[in-house]
Image (spheres, grey):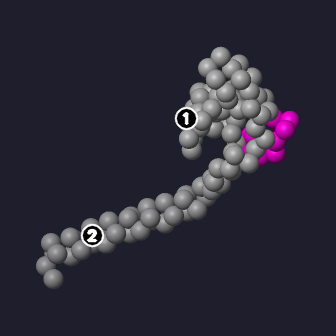
């Protein structure tokens, strides 16, 4: 091998070592990422039918549901500035009250 080939091979091996270290670091970081659980079935929550100025809608509140389901729905609403469309329904906080959530079929 010529001197230039030796240098090129050494540079290539250094590069591959750096790539391998980067891959190992990425795998470690990905392994530490918290797994997000799937959304619960919000249809299983207790919904009461109400009549409003724009027609019928459904309403639920924190006291009538499992804490997990209500909290997850409230978190999605907060992440979407209080209004969210999901699986054929539009959800919103009732009069900006985070303990009461309304929905209407789209």
Residue 29 higher or lower than 16, as above or below: above
| 5 displayed left or right of 87 | left
Residue 7 picture location, percent across and down:
21, 71
Regarding residue 39, the answer to whether it shows in the image is yes
Residue 80 picture location, percent across and down:
57, 32
Dominant SS type (magenta): helix
Q: Is mark 2 on a helix, strand or loop?
A: helix
| 99 displayed left or right of 26 | right
- Between residue 105 and residue 69, name the one nearer to us: 105
Residue underneath mark 2: 12
Q: Quadrant of residue 86?
A: top right
Callout 1 environment at 10 Å: few (<14), some (14 to 19), or many (20+)?
few
Split into 4 quadrants, where in the image is the C terminus?
Answer: top right
Measuring 49% from the left and 66% from the top, which residue is drawn there?
A: 24
- Whether residue 70 appears in magenta in the rendering, the answer is yes
Q: In which quarter of the image is residue 20?
A: bottom left
Residue 26 higher or lower than 16, as above or below: above
Tag nearer the camera, 1 or 2: 1
Q: Earlier in the sequence, mark 1 or mark 2?
A: 2
Q: Any mark on residue 106, and which? A: 1
Q: Any mark on residue 4, and which? A: none
Regarding residue 78, the answer to whether it shows in the image is no
Residue 92 picture location, percent across and down:
65, 28
Q: Which residue lies furthest to the bottom in this view?
A: 1
The magenta region covers: 62-71
Residue 96 higher or lower than 17, as above or below: above
């Amino acid at each position: 091998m010529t001197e230039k080939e030796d240098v090129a091979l050494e540079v290539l091996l250094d590069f591959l070592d750096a790539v391998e270290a980067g891959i190992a670091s990425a795998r470690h970081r990905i392994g530490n990422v918290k797994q997000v659980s799937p959304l619960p079935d919000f249809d299983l929550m207790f919904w009461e039918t109400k009549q409003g100025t724009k027609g019928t809608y459904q309403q639920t509140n924190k006291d009538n549901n499992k804490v997990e389901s209500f909290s997850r729905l409230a978190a999605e609403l907060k992440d979407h500035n209080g209004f969210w469309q999901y699986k054929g329904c539009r959800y919103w906080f009732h009069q900006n009250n985070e303990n009461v959530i309304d929905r209407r079929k789209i």
